[in-house]
Image: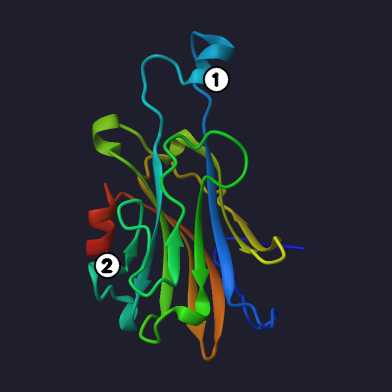
Amino acid sequence: MAINLQKGQRVDLTKGNPGLTKIMVGLGWDPVQKSGGGGFFSALFGGASAPNVDCDASVLMLGDNDKLQNNKDVIYFGNLRSVDGSVQHSGDNLTGDGDGDDEQIMIDLSRVPAHIKKLVFVVNIYDCVKRKQHFGMIRNAFIRVVNPNTHQELIHYNLTDDYNGKTCLVVGEIYRYGNEWKFAAVGNGTNATGLAEIVRSYS
């Protein structure tokens, strides 16, 4: 039975799950159905005018003082695997259509280098300025943590705030706490216009 979190909550990830080292972090979202002409088929195929809202999930592997030490520690659609192999991204999903996870990140906590203290999960909208898009156009956003060996969902956090006008979401964090790992439900929206701007804020 998954623990359903509210914004700001922190829970043990490994302490209550002895032997857990490999996890799958799933992130999902749905496009808000477009209103106006075209009815069902317009909603189904995205209409003729506006492009799909292309959300991209990324992981920032932070060291001391919550700082990014190397750009290679940013795992996203252009860099799908960390140098040490502890974090592996499933790749880009361009639309967010369909049920379940839109993007998945596999993590081997036992292989995360000792100098990495925190993994920050971020979702931003690709080309948001040019396309005039924001997270008010997205609904049902969530992050979840799954044990891939048993397929058991351990943690689930639905992002329910009003993110109208926001172009980036800091969704959640997995961080070291002594010899254990914890998960924090963050859910903060920002106006970062792209991954490069997000990276600079942690540099």
Q: Which of the two residues, 180 or 190, is positioned nearer the viewer here?
A: 180
Pick the residue in front: 58 or 149: 149
> Which element carries disc 2, helix, strand or loop?
helix
Q: Residue at x 64, y 64 (%)?
A: 148
Where residue 136 appears, as percent x and y from the top left, is 45, 37
Q: Which residue is mark 1?
A: 44
Q: Is residue 89 left or right of residue 130?
A: right
The disc, 1 or 2, on the residue closer to the chain's N-terminal end is 1
Query: Closer to the camera, 32 or 97?
Result: 97
Quarter of the rendering containing residue 15? bottom right
The C terminus appears in which quarter of the rendering?
Answer: bottom left
Say which residue appears at 39% left-offset and 38% top-offset: 54
User: Which residue position is annotated with label 2?
Assistant: 72
Discs 1/2, front: 2
- In the rendered image, residue 80, in percent from the top left (x then y), is placed at 37, 58
- Marks 1 and 2, how far apart at CA: 38 Å
Three-letter residue code for mark 1: Leu
Name the quarter where the N terminus is drawn.
Answer: bottom right
